[in-house]
Image (cartoon, helix red, strand yellow):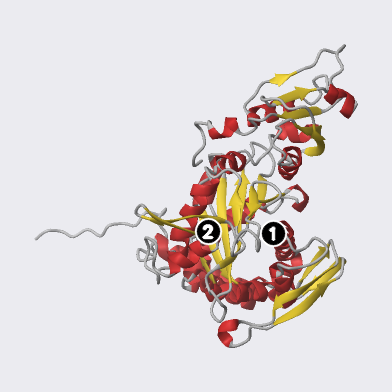
Amino acid sequence: MATMTRRRRSSYNLLPQRLTGKRIVLAAAAAVLLIVGTYGVRLAFALGHAFHQDPVSAVVGALQGGGGSSIDVARQHMRRINIALYGYGGGGHDGAFLTDSIMVVSIQPEPSGPPQIAEISIPRDWYVPIDLGSGKSKYGRINEAYSDGISGDGPASGSAPEAGASVANPTLQDLLGIHIDHWIGVDFQAFQAAVDAVGGVDVDVQNSFSDSQYPHGECDQGDCSIETVHFTAGMQHMNGARALIFSRSRHGDNGEGSDFARSKRQQMVIAALKQKVVSVGGIGNLPDLLNALGDHVRTDLAIGDVEALYGWVKDVSSASIEHVSLDNTNFLVDCGYPYSCGAYYLYAHDRSYHSIAHFMQSVFLSQPAVAEKAPVTLYDASGGRNDASGRWATVMGMVGLHTTDGGSVARQVDTQVIDQSGGRDAQTATWLANYFGVQVTTPPKTTATPTTTATGGGGVVVVLGSLEEEAFLADPGVGHL
């Protein structure tokens, strides 16, 4: 009869055999909940609600701190991340999934220090080709793309969480020439509830304005009436309803009726909400904020992605964020409604969209150029009478350059970038020359040119020739990042 020997347990293996690694993690999560008490339980259930997971799995994801997530991997490899935000009315609103608000948040990691961030607003009335997948497309306002996906016109089932993004993301990619890595869809109710959940936000209203055409209700609920809303310049504390009106208003006076002004107001409210959330008081309201989002948010971001994002951008100063808006002051032009077209549309100056793609791929100024804070004067030598110097002064101002519109000068074919700083602003001149596809020129010290006379010397001068965009149209690098 064989002798049975009992295997001795190693003194280094003191855990019960049934206590697997997975059970250890779950036990740790439960311990955390017990330690942090009521707040932790509320936070766990709120995380589960917002990310559509069971509470324990949500806490486990949060405890991992974002390590190994797609966002963390991109940061480690110094790869730019682009996140599309789609804001729509939701149930009970006309055109429930028409995205009245579209924004791309772009994050560029830096070798040292915090990343660069740009918030890029896209106007809802931009008339574009909408990518329906499988080689199919249609033309319409860009705000229709997300709704088309929900309607089942795209590659995903209309009931799938990613249905709207399956059409909206490729459409944005085709137009902007950048890859959309992640997306968030949020309805107006979530936006309003999120502001209320953190106790409201403080917004510095830059211009007093009134909008006499603000919708009082929703037509599909029998209320097509309008009302007048008013905002007074200065710092104001806004609850969710007030912040939503401030963000949605489209027909304000005193310069607040443009797409550019509306986009800027939306960016201001988002910045105020972000500031409130990361404050000490805001963290205490985090469970309420997540529950407010709940069923009113769709996203492909996992909890680990959000953790990594928070850790990455939490120390970025709001003042350093670029606020970029595509509108009829730069790359777009309105159709001339109601005289030249039957409905209000915006079209791209460059119907190939290469000029926009080139700008989006170059939206981050090099850090050495940022540090120079060089004065840049732009002159229009295009002869096109399309305010080239004004447009480009606005465009380059959005990426952080200190620009001045120098007006029109004698016509010339080629664009010039002239460094008049004696080398002090060489990095800015180099960046601009690369952008316009030319070489930096330096005038002889003894020669006074019309531009040096006009600017008094110093800084960088850009003379926009008649082929100002040829470099973009011929750029073999234009495409998806």
Q: Is residue 428 in view? A: no
Residue drawn at the location 35% of the way across and 63% of the way down: 17
Q: Is residue 356 above or below residue 431?
A: below
Residue 265 in the image: state x and y as whole percent. Answer: 74, 62
| Residue ID for mark 2 | 183
Image-based side of 346 in relation to 56, left or right: right
Q: Residues within 10 Å of mark 2 (few under 14, many from 20)?
A: many
The secondary structure type at the circle numbered 1 is helix
- What is the spatial separation of the Cα atoms under label 1 and label 2, in whole angstroms? 22 Å
356, 166: nearer the viewer:
356
Amino acid type assigned to the residue bearing label 2 in the image: Trp
Q: Is residue 247 in view? A: yes
Q: Residue furthest front?
A: 339
The secondary structure type at the circle numbered 2 is strand
Q: Residue furthest left?
A: 1
Amino acid type assigned to the residue bearing label 1 in the image: Asp
Residue 410 in the image: state x and y as whole percent. Answer: 77, 27
| Residue ID for mark 1 | 259
